[in-house]
Amino acid sequence: MNAREGALRVLYDVEVNKAYSNLALNKELDGKEYSQLDKGFMTELVYGVLENAIYIDHVIQQFSSIKLKKINANTLNLLRLGIYQIQFLDKIPPSAAVNESVNLAKIYSKKSSGFVNAILRNVIRNKDNIKMPDVKKEPVKYLSITYSHPEWMVQQFLKHFSMEFTEELLKANNTTPELNVRVNTLKISIEDCIKALEKEGLKVTQNPHIAEALTIKGVHNLVEMELLRKGYIYIQDFGSMLIARIVEPKEGDFVIDVCSAPGGKATHMAQLMKNEGKVLARDIHPHKLKLIKRNAKRLETSIVETQNFNGKDIDGNLLGMADKVLVDAPCSGLGIIRRKPEIKYNKTPDDINEITEIQLEILRNASKYVKPKGFIVYSTCTIEPSENQGVVEKFLKDNTNFQLVNIGEEYKDIIPGETQGEMIQLYPNVHGTDGFFIAKLQRKK
Ligand SMILES: C[S@@+](CC[C@H](N)C(=O)[O-])C[C@H]1O[C@@H](n2cnc3c(N)ncnc32)[C@H](O)[C@@H]1O
């Protein structure tokens, strides 16, 4: 098995079985004997194809008389893999890209090896003459093909942002995020952790806003990293870390995290509480509670208690009991396209309308657990205003007993970039973080 074959299998899984790219890739990497080099190359191929799939399909359609819909999944993915290497990877000789795809076609899609060969050779000959839509006449189509985002998504972004901002956002969505980790200060001091990472030959930078947040460079094998396995660090985006910081739980607090799996923010809150008090970590999916438990065990956050509970229901036993409540709501994920590029192809405009109803219902129910003068934080990893400000504004309309905390002002020391308003929105192209939204509300009495 080589990297290209592994990549083909992962792409099949993502396209046909609708698997998440990160999970499908881990499944392929797990337990198979790939070299370190092959693992890296396979990851690059999978994400490269997924990030650029609309553009690549546009190229295929220019050279194929057969419509894309009529081409079977393996043949199509072999063409995509070939074109990605020809068009985006200077280090691969184009002839090698063609030969490898043709050889794999002989195994995975026997009758189409001639077709794969013909299309890829044609692409090599015409690689600098790919026809693109005119940006002035068809801006949506141009952005959609150039940056491989579906047209409806581009239109949605253009409703809220300028052409220039949208283009920067789409570009940023196709980049690989840097590796951010949170130091688990329950087990190690920040200073000692930085020293230990540097001892492993890694380049470490401490975030200027959040002391426990580090960026590390030079990691070859994350899974084998001792500091990670032993719970000294937790992989987490800066934007995500900001959320627990804005919940700002104190030692001894009772906190409810109503949508908590896999427990990134729940364990961070327990860390900020120095393992004193209680974090009730709930989720609708029982199998995901295992992930929270595993993380809490590894990080030694002993105050995290898991519970299977649907946020669409109300728990009469907890009314007015919590000092702080976190609703890290399920969302369209338009802020984490860098990590899960398949979001671009799997989501529809209807998904957004549907999810806003659920988000509002979960927020309404969760607010009932807040003590007088207590707080509730609503966060998502999307940049779609109807799921963010839209939900909060609707909530505030019928819940006049809550008021917004001006987090742009109150937490300006930890929020990256320019001062923001009462609610904050982070963007990959502006802040270099995932596209998180955060609002904090206080119960008046
Ligand atoms: C954005 S993720 C949470 C991430 C988590 N807070 C963290 O920091 O690791 C949203 C979670 O909400 C859960 N979820 C979806 N619908 C839910 C519902 N109706 N009630 C409770 N949890 C729900 C999903 O299973 C998912 O784990």
Image (cartoon, rainbow, N blue to C red):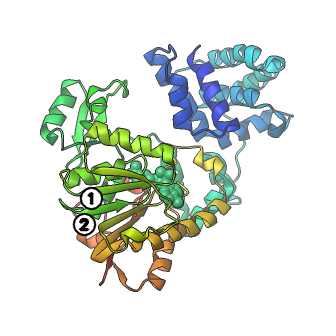
Residue at the farthest right position: 65
Q: Residue at x 27, y 54 (%)?
A: 269
Q: In this view, does 268 lie to the left or right of 73?
A: left
Q: Is residue 318 above or below residue 71?
A: below
Estimate the x, y position of residue 247 in percent, counting from the top left.
29, 63
Tell me the quadrant of the picture where the C terminus can be found. Answer: bottom left
Q: In this view, does 353 lie to the left or right of 253?
A: right
Of 284 and 170, which appears nearest the observer? 284
Q: Could you tell me the amino acid type at mark 2? A: Tyr
How many numbered dots are placed on residues in this image?
A: 2
Of 403 and 11, which appears nearest the observer? 403
Residue at the farthest front position: 317
Q: Which residue is drawn at 44% across and 67% down?
A: 315
Q: Is residue 439 above or below residue 268?
A: below
Q: Is residue 17 above or below residue 36?
A: below
For residue 245, which numbered disc appears in the image?
1
Q: Is residue 327 visible?
A: yes
Q: Is mark 2 on a helix, strand or loop?
A: loop
Q: In this view, does 251 lie to the left or right of 49?
A: left
Which is nearer the N-term, disc 1 or disc 2? 1
Label 2, on which residue?
411
Instruction: Tell me how far mark 1 sits from mark 2, CA to CA.
Output: 9 Å
Estimate the x, y position of residue 331 in percent, counting from the top left.
52, 58
Q: Choose top left, top right, bottom left or bottom right for residue 386.
A: bottom right
Q: What element carries label 1?
A: helix
Q: Is residue 387 left or right of residue 274?
A: right
Q: Which residue is drawn at 43% across and 17% down?
A: 36
Tag 1 near tag 2, CB within 8 Å:
yes
Q: How crowded is mark 2: few (under 14 residues within 10 Å), some or many (20 or more)?
A: some
Q: Can residue 421 be seen in this view?
A: no
